[in-house]
Image: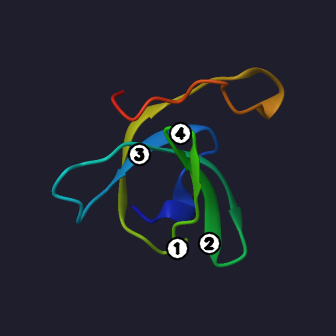
Amino acid sequence: MKLYELPRNTYFTIEDDPQQHVYFFDHIDGMYSYCLYGDEVVHIAAWTDVQIVRPVKTYAGSIPNYVSSSV
């Protein structure tokens, strides 16, 4: 699945990452995304192959205050 196909507020891993780091997907912004890795903002290419770890339900589409890389 491509990153641009993920629902908002979803934890995911990058398919080619041997360490399987877990990221939090917020939204796509043009060709790149707005994601979190721990408390760091990262911009991953929208066409990156990813796997869903688990979806997150939040109120009013907000980003959770705490996003752990050890989900």
Disc 1 is placed on an element classified as loop
Disc 4: which residue:
10
Q: Is residue 52 above or below residue 17?
A: above
Residue 8 sits in quarter: top right
Give me the residue at 83% from left, 27% from top: 60
Residue 48 location, x and y as percent?
42, 71
- Give the crowd class for mark 2: few <14, some 14-19, many >=20 residues within 10 Å: some
Closest to the camera, between mark 2 and mark 4, is 2
Q: Earlier in the sequence, mark 3 or mark 2?
A: 3
Labels 2 and 1 touching (C-beta < 8 A): yes
- Give the crowd class for mark 3: few <14, some 14-19, many >=20 residues within 10 Å: many
Estimate the spatial distance between the alpha carbons at disc 3 and disc 2, rounded to whole Å: 15 Å
Give me the residue at 61% from left, 38% from top: 9
Residue 18 location, x and y as percent?
16, 57
**Residue in front for this viewpoint, 32 or 57:** 32
Q: Earlier in the sequence, mark 2 or mark 1?
A: 2
> Label 2 amino acid?
Tyr
Q: Earlier in the sequence, mark 3 or mark 1?
A: 3
Estimate the spatial distance between the alpha carbons at disc 2 and disc 4, rounded to whole Å: 16 Å
Give me the residue at 77% from left, 31% from top: 62
> Label 3 amino acid?
Phe
Colour setup of the view = rainbow
Quarter of the figure with the C terminus: top left
**Residue in front for this viewpoint, 35 or 52:** 35
Disc 2: which residue:
32
Disc 3 is placed on an element classified as strand
Residue 52 location, x and y as percent?
39, 44
- Give the crowd class for mark 4: few <14, some 14-19, many >=20 residues within 10 Å: some
Disc 1: which residue:
45
23 horizontally vs 17: left or right = right
Estimate the spatial distance between the alpha carbons at disc 4 and disc 3, rounded to whole Å: 6 Å
